[in-house]
Amino acid sequence: MNELNRNRQIIRFLLGLLGVLLLGWIFWQIRQVVIYFAVATVLALMGRPLMKLLDRIRIKNWRMPVWLSALTVLVTFIFVTVLIFQFLIPVLVDQIQIIASIDVDSLMGAFDEQITAIERTLYKMNITDVNRESIEKKISENLDFSMLGDVVTSMLNGLGSLLIAVMSILFITFFLLKDQGIVNNIIDSMTPDRYLEKVHSIITDTRKLLSRYFLGVALQVSIIATIIGVGLSIVGVPNAILIGILAGVFNIIPYLGPIIGGVLGLTLSVLSNVHAEVDANMLPLILEVLAVFATAQLTDNFVLQPLIFSKSVKAHPLEIFVVIMSAGMISGVIGMILAVPTYTFLRIVAREFFQGYKVVQGLTKDL
């Protein structure tokens, strides 16, 4: 009898494992749809506060229907996105034209004093292989701005796929906002009755915390973009707002993003000023741009991140740092971006199902 029970358990385990593998294979085959659903979920979470606000509207006995509230939130998202792109596209085209018109002679001329100083230093060190001609040749080989045209062409060719993706995401987002119980119903049908209360608690708390987190990230991006855009405008960098927005978006990547945004911003700032009537010495411009990015980064590190991470997901900054670094080592940049939402969800699950363990009690005491 024991042998029979053991065989049944093995068979049950193997069938469960086979089911998990099959489910994983299906998700991989429809990964594009999964990505659409994930993006739509983030938008729905960001739209929840506005949905609640619209739900409070009362005109005598009239109350805004749920479908109209969902549609209003969706239209708001579309309106804001269109406004951003309406401003961003002409600026982006202008920036591309500036960069595409740069030649190596202009670039070398802008850094004439620095290159001369480097040549003298290398000569004193008896290094003769590196000189102005070799530097210019290296730049010509590796800095081909003509490829920007091909990039733009590729983007235009991909507009059809992008349109399908946008329409799919908007469609899913609308129903996630309108039928907020649809996810609950699906999960309820897959959850044993004895766990329903805990699962409902997990869903409720996850929605609340992640909604605050994603709104906080959007606010973080906006503030960083504003600080950098305004700062570079004061310094006199062309298309400063575009550089600010790009730096703000890259800032979504924890720790690594600000470095990428800073390097990109500094590069675009310098290249945009190659044709301008600036001093032959570009060092003052570089220092001013670095000062702007340093100001934005200090604001982010000491003000925005503690407020967003600590307050929205109720976790200590050191705890968040360890989680993000660990996720980065395991899954790279994508892991770093998804680290905080995933960790938040796992903490909520652990609080409901593993509260008896001291380590879980310590990690979830603020939830």
Image (spheres, rainbow, N blue to C red):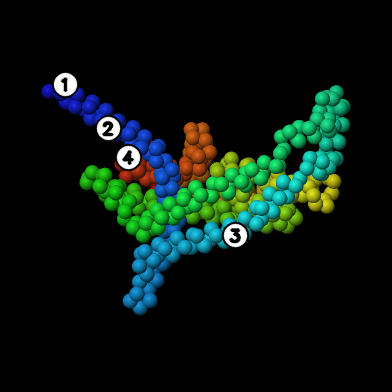
* Residue 262 figure quarter: top right
User: Which residue corresponds to mark 2?
Assistant: 16
Q: Disc 4 marks which residue?
A: 354
Lower position in the chain sequence, tag 2 or tag 1? 1
**Labelled disc at residue 302:** none
Secondary structure at numbered mark 1: helix
Residue at image position (29%, 49%) is 186
Whole-angstrom CA distance, mark 2 to mark 3, is 51 Å
Q: Is residue 1 left or right of residue 161?
A: left
* Residue behind mark 1: 3
Real-space Cα separation, disc 2 to disc 1, in angstroms: 20 Å
- The structure residue drawn at horizontal position 58% and vertical position 49%, both measured from the top left corner, is 156
Circle 4 residues within 10 Å: few <14, some 14–19, many ≥20: some
Q: Nearer the viewer, residue 353 or 47?
A: 47
Give how far across and how far down residue 284 sits, in percent.
79, 48
Q: Secondary structure at mark 2?
A: helix
Within 10 Å of disc 3 (Cα), the crowding (few <14, some 14-19, many 20+) is: few
The residue labelled by disc 3 is 86
- The residue sitting at 48% across, 63% down in the picture is 76
User: How far is mark 4 from mark 2, CA to CA?
Assistant: 22 Å
Label 2–label 3 contact, CB within 8 A:
no
